[in-house]
Image (spheres, rainbow, N blue to C red):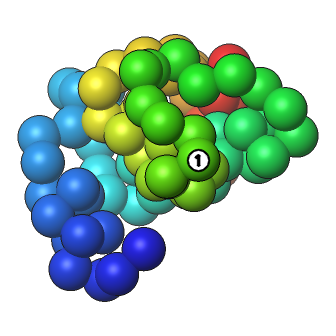
Amino acid sequence: MPEQQLDELTEQAPPPEIDSKYRLIILAAKRSKQLQRGARPRIEIDQTKHKPTRIALEEVIQGTIHFHTKIDGDEAAAEAS
């Protein structure tokens, strides 16, 4: 994905529960791995024209990926479901 397209996607207003660009990228990366392992996309998109990373990023931005944040001491981790 060209850098300009990535910048445009990450600059879109993410769902309110995504508090930073970094969380957005982490969630998209985890979802991309799921898609690469055979998960079906949760949005209408042509899988032959778009890579799993693009599909995952679109899913997270559109709010179709649900997650929760775990806090263990001072460390926070997000999990995609």
Q: Nearer the viewer, residue 41 or 60?
A: 41
Q: Position of residue 52 (x, y in %)?
A: 61, 50
The C terminus sits in image quarter = top right
Q: Position of residue 19 (x, y in %)?
A: 28, 42
| Horizontal arrangement in the rendering, residue 81 relative to residue 43 (left or right) | right
The residue that appears at 41% across and 21% down in the rendered structure is: 44
Q: Nearer the viewer, residue 78 or 12?
A: 12
- Say above or below: 5 vs 41: below
To which residue does mark 1 refer? 48
| Horizontal arrangement in the rendering, residue 33 relative to residue 25 (left or right) | right
Callout 1: 10 Å neighbours few (<14), some, many (20+)?
Answer: few
The N terminus sits in image quarter = bottom left
Q: Nearer the viewer, residue 45 or 22?
A: 45
**Element at label 1:** loop
Amino acid at the residue labelled 1: Thr
- Say above or below: 23 vs 67: below
Q: Position of residue 37 (x, y in %)?
A: 88, 40
- Say above or below: 57 vs 9: above
The residue that appears at 59% across and 25% down in the rendered structure is: 41
| Horizontal arrangement in the rendering, residue 64 relative to residue 70 (left or right) | left
The residue that appears at 44% across and 21% down in the rendered structure is: 43
Give the image quarter of residue 31. top right
